[in-house]
Image: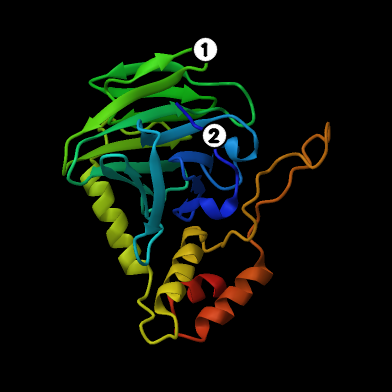
Amino acid sequence: MWRPQPHVLRGYALLADGERGALVGQDGHVTWLCVPRWHHEPVFATLVGGRGSYQVAPVDTWSVWSGSYEPGTLIWRGRWTTSDSAVECWDALALPGDEHTAVLLRRIVTTDAPVRMAVALTPRAGFTDRGMTDLGRRNGTWTARLGSLYLRWTGAPDAVVHGADDQLGLIVDVPAGQHHDLVLEMSDQPVGQDPPRPDLLWRATRTRWQARVPAFADTLAPRDTRHAYAVLRGLTSATGGMVAAATTSLPERQNGGGNYDYRYAWIRDQAWVGQAIATHGPHSLVTDAVE
């Protein structure tokens, strides 16, 4: 179901919750996400030619793509205008971010016409061909193991397994003016027994963004300043460390053993951020930088 697109970084949206970050492309395809945290191996890595994918996109390939962030957040609203309708897919990593568990929210939202959407989930364990094991469905919820990770996927009760890649795929028909939620949980610990409630997750995520990101109404460019702050907040862990280099952790050279590229929090970079933010006010990111 995946339609490849050129890898131009400006065509990707960043989702982040402080403990990890994901990239979403124009085709509704999550091309990069490391779990459980920034420095661990990816479950989606097609951005750099690896394996693993998660796509939500219109079945109608004749579409024009656009999108934007909800102000002051890293909640992305991708939008497609097709030949006879318009549809959005809202994407976010749920807040508050937990260092053990990534919760990826995807909400398909229609306007004045029904839409048929293609959904395909094919996670991989790092830069390998190892897919899901112990895959099963109970009460409409899918569970599986991915290496040492635990997975749970809700909102796709009619998904079927395709091919040798163990791809879970389905077609979702969303009536006009309605929405459909997909929630993917991935953790290095067993997930809870109760399936997630999407409305509560979305509400908590928006509330947390509103509480964390100032309005900056008294600056020369409030929208840009606010968005820059939201990005920095998304790159800052609950421990206060801010990711300075969210790289791919690919080996630096062939057969080089464990000499991996870095994904570190640099004190120097965080000090610069702290000084910049302190010029406006004593915001929480300044406290994180000082700590």
Write down the residue under mark 1: 164
Label 2 sits on what residue type?
A: Pro
**Circle 2 — which element?**
loop
Q: Secondary structure at mark 1?
A: loop
Q: Is residue 133 above or below residue 89?
A: above
Where is residue 54 shown, x and y percent of the image? 45, 33
Quarter the N terminus occupies:
top left
| Foreground residue among 79 and 245 | 79
Residue 201 at x, y percent in the picture: 27, 48
Pointer 1: residues within 10 angstroms few (<14), some, or many (20+)?
few
Residue that protrudes farthest toward the top in the picture: 164
Is residue 181 positioned above or below 211 on the image?
Answer: above
The dot on residue 4 is 2
Q: Is residue 202 left or right of residue 185?
A: left
Residue 191 in the figure: left or right of residue 175: right
131 relative position to 187: left or right: right
**Where, quadrant-wise, is the C terminus in this rendering?**
bottom right
Q: Residues within 10 Å of mark 2 (few under 14, many from 20)?
A: few
Horizontal and vertical percent for residue 126? 61, 31
Q: Is residue 291 visible?
A: no
